[in-house]
Amino acid sequence: MKVTVSRKAHFNAAHRLYRKEWSMEQNDDVFGKCNNPNYHGHNYELIVSVTGEIDQETGFVIDVKILSHLIYELIEKEFDHKNLNLDVPEFHDLNPTAENIAVVIWNKLRGFIDNRKELEVTLYETPRNFVSYKGN
């Protein structure tokens, strides 16, 4: 029997969507107001879900205290109140779209979660715009 355990987190961050090799006009055409050279921010909502068998000894799929600690140390401390383009090394050459942010978060967490368990990251950039990534 597989069960999914989820933990919600929150961080605020600024970013700019653009490609360095494109002209300002092309960036504006593709990214619109998200190409603001002075950046813009979001109040991101993050849901990290772990799916697996229930451990018969503990009754847990994953200890939520451990999951909470991983999210805080690896994501919130690294991303909260940061400029993703400038302050987070993974985005120095990677456009910090919601899609790419979700993949980066998944990659940061994957090595700390038992490989027998499925990991999914859902990232809300706004209450109506969100992405999910399961590692495939």
Image (spheres, rainbow, N blue to C red):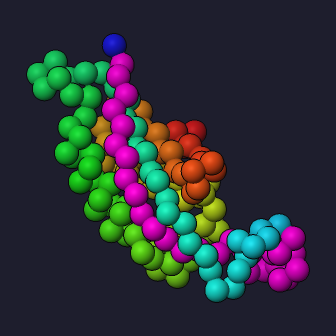
What residue span does the magenta drawing correspond to?
A: 2-29
Q: Is residue 85 above or below residue 122?
A: below
Q: Residue at 33% of width from left, 68% of height from top? A: 77
Query: Does the magenta segment cover residue 61?
Result: no
Q: Residue at 36% of width from left, 37% of height from top? A: 6
Q: Nearer the viewer, residue 44 or 71?
A: 44
State whether residue 104 appears in this view: no
Q: Quick one: quadrant of the C terminus?
A: top right
Q: Residue at 34% of width from left, 43% of height from top? A: 7
Residue 128 location, x and y as percent? Answer: 63, 48
Residue 48 location, x and y as percent? Answer: 40, 44
Residue 59, located in which quarter of the rendered image? top left
Q: Is residue 79 above or below residue 123?
A: below
Q: Is residue 131 left or right of residue 22?
A: left
Query: Does the magenta segment cover residue 24?
Result: yes
Q: Is residue 57 above or below residue 7?
A: above
Residue 115, located in which quarter of the rendered image? top left
Q: Quick one: quadrant of the N terminus?
A: top left
Q: Nearer the viewer, residue 30 or 11?
A: 11
